[in-house]
Amino acid sequence: MSLKASLLAELTFEAGNTRKLLQAMTDEVLDYAPAHKAWTMAQLASHIVESYYWYVATFDTNDFDMATYRYDKGDTSKAANILAKFEENLPLAVAALESAADDSVFMENWTMRMGEQVFMQMPRIQAVRGFLMNHLYHHRGQLSIYLRAAGCKVPGIYGPSQDEQGNG
């Protein structure tokens, strides 16, 4: 299996888990935040959804400048809108990953900056694994805790959750 095929398989499999978490949100809990310094659930979920859009910038250029990056989060006041934005961004992420001509694209150097300040400089594969995938999984874990704390049923991700087993 090629590197691209492996990453595409992981992206599409994990998108199903992301979808389940986003579907568990209700409009009533979008303003929930576990602490005054923390994002609200809507902000966290919107950040998760936006991370799928980052695939476009990761494959469109070898030099991603956050100073010129633009993204429309849409209306995050409704859970259905956040889920719809995810459904809009997911095919863009898949298409960006599919755009890699061959596995050598993953070995090219990739930079993330804010103007002149360089945040990351690494092979694209490292950006995909760390900046895109692992970063997403970290925030999904946070979202599952937000859901539990806000009183929502938490879906199973890598097996049934306590809620799905009737223990929640």
Image (cartoon, rainbow, N blue to C red):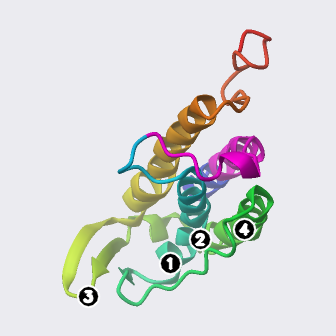
Residue 26, x across and y down, in percent = 75, 47
Is tag 3's residue or tag 1's residue first in the polypeptide sequence?
1
Residue type pointed to by label 3: Gly
Under tag 3, what secondary structure?
Answer: loop
Query: How many angstroms separate mark 1 from mark 2 (CA)?
Result: 8 Å
Under tag 2, what secondary structure?
Answer: helix
The magenta segment is 9-34
Query: How many angstroms separate mark 3 from mark 4 (CA)?
Result: 28 Å
Placement of 53 over or under 4, stated as above or below: below
Which numbered dot is residue 53? 2
Residue type pointed to by label 2: Tyr
Residue 164, x across and y down, in percent = 79, 19
Mark 1 is surrounded, within 10 Å at the Cα level, by few (under 14), some (14 to 19) or many (20 or more) other residues, namely some
Residue with the mark numbered 1: 57
Residue type pointed to by label 1: Ala
Query: How many angstroms separate mark 2 from mark 4 (CA)?
Result: 10 Å
For marks 3 and 1, give the one nearer the viewer: 3
Residue 49, x across and y down, in percent = 62, 61
Is tag 2's residue or tag 3's residue first in the polypeptide sequence?
2
Please state if 116 lies on the left or on the right of 122 as rendered: left
Q: Residue at x 69, y 64 (%)?
A: 77
Residue type pointed to by label 4: Lys
For marks 1 and 2, give the one nearer the viewer: 2
Q: Residue furthest top?
A: 167
Would you say residue 36 is visible in this rendering? yes
Please state if 20 lies on the left or on the right of 135 as rendered: right
Residue 15, x across and y down, in percent = 70, 49
Residue with the mark numbered 4: 85
Mark 2 is surrounded, within 10 Å at the Cα level, by few (under 14), some (14 to 19) or many (20 or more) other residues, namely many
